[in-house]
Amino acid sequence: MAKNPTPSETLIAEFASYLKRKNLSSNTIIAYTLSARVFYSYFDEPSVKNLHEFIHLLEHDHLPATVNQRIHAINHFLLFLEDCRAEMYPELRKFRLPAVKIPRGSFLDYVISNEDCILLQERLKQDGQDFWYFVVRFLVTTGVRVSELTKIKVEHLTCSHLDLYSKGGKVRRIYITDSLCDEALEWCQARGKDSGFLFSTKKDRPITTRGIHCQLKHFAILYGIDPSTIYPHSFRHRFAKNFLDRCGDIALLADLLGHESVETTRIYLTRSSKEQQTLMDEIVTW
């Protein structure tokens, strides 16, 4: 005899349907509903008190960036309740959880260094891991998010860019340098690949973001690089830091990264603890 779903399971299923109607990606729906399930594993009902306690629990076990991802998901769940179940949770109308603060120093301390980034690419090339070499090359030279990386096709190499369209109709252009296009096209020709997703599985489907994350961690351990600095978004951070060091145009960088506000981009003007220590050693000689 089939077991009837619990009220929370029913609500989460309705939340998933709501997100699907909003045209969110399947990966996003999975991530958001997972956060809702994690909440219900601690509490029976959403309330202002329970939601604040939930965030305190997360802060004990996770990095601030991970906590903020959960908060973002839960805030979408609260929007769902407001749109579809307002009569059940009047206390939660217009209520949203604020993001937790991310210490700037600790954030930049977990960004891959230029030296390790070069080492990783060299070792991947030496070991014949061309697929993963180009994953890293594209991440660190374009500044794309890993979800955007999986959308790049061979056809984009001939025009040196990829246009992404937001739900508001805005266009963000991701530029690919001519040298990288030439190198990647040569790789594609050697594989006999002249169209389709650049980073695909054997069945010619885009590789998953989780697959990229796990494999990069594997190579970090294999090559003796600090695994805490090897994750897909780390290369986006490295791109941003290098771009500002070479160019200094923070408004242009904000456009390239797809940030809605330059204030979001200003994090890259700060320095990591290691960079601060190096500067101090050079400057303080008295």
Image (tube, rainbow, N blue to C red):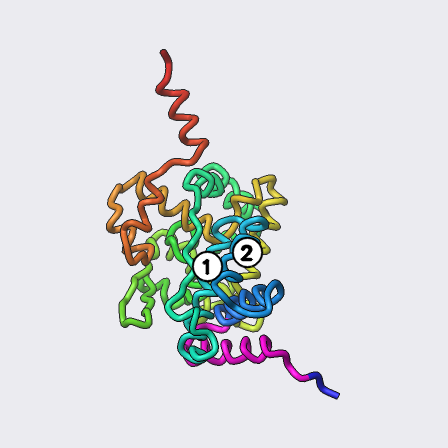
Residue 196 on image: x %, y %: 45, 71
Please, what is the dominant secondary structure of the magenta stretch? helix
Residue that label 2 marks: 213
Q: Is residue 21 magenta?
A: yes
Q: Quick one: quadrant of the C terminus?
A: top left
Q: Can residue 283 be seen here? A: yes
Which portion, as a residue range, is magenta? 4-26
Q: Tell me how far mark 1 sits from mark 2, CA to CA.
A: 9 Å
Q: Secondary structure at mark 2?
A: helix
Hey, what amino acid is under mark 1?
Val
Q: Position of residue 85 (x, y in %)?
A: 45, 79
Q: Give the answer, above or below, for where 108 lies relative to 205.
A: above
Camera-nearest residue between 35 and 253: 35
Is any part of residue 198 visible from this angle? no
Residue 11 among magenta residues? yes
Q: Residue at x 44, y 51 (%)?
A: 100
Q: Which residue does the image show at 26% across and 46% down from the upper left?
A: 250
Q: Quadrant of residue 175?
A: bottom left
Q: Front-most of 152 and 57? A: 57
- Residue density around tag 2, few if under 14, some if 14–19, many if 20 or more, within 10 Å: some
Disc 1, disc 2: CB below 8 Å? yes
Q: Residue at x 46, y 59 (%)?
A: 146
Type of the residue with mark 2: His
Residue 113: x %, y % from top left: 46, 39
Quarter of the figure that contains the N terminus? bottom right
Q: Which residue is mark 1?
A: 146
Identify the residue at horizontal 38%, vertical 36% (top origin): 271
The residue most toward the right is 1
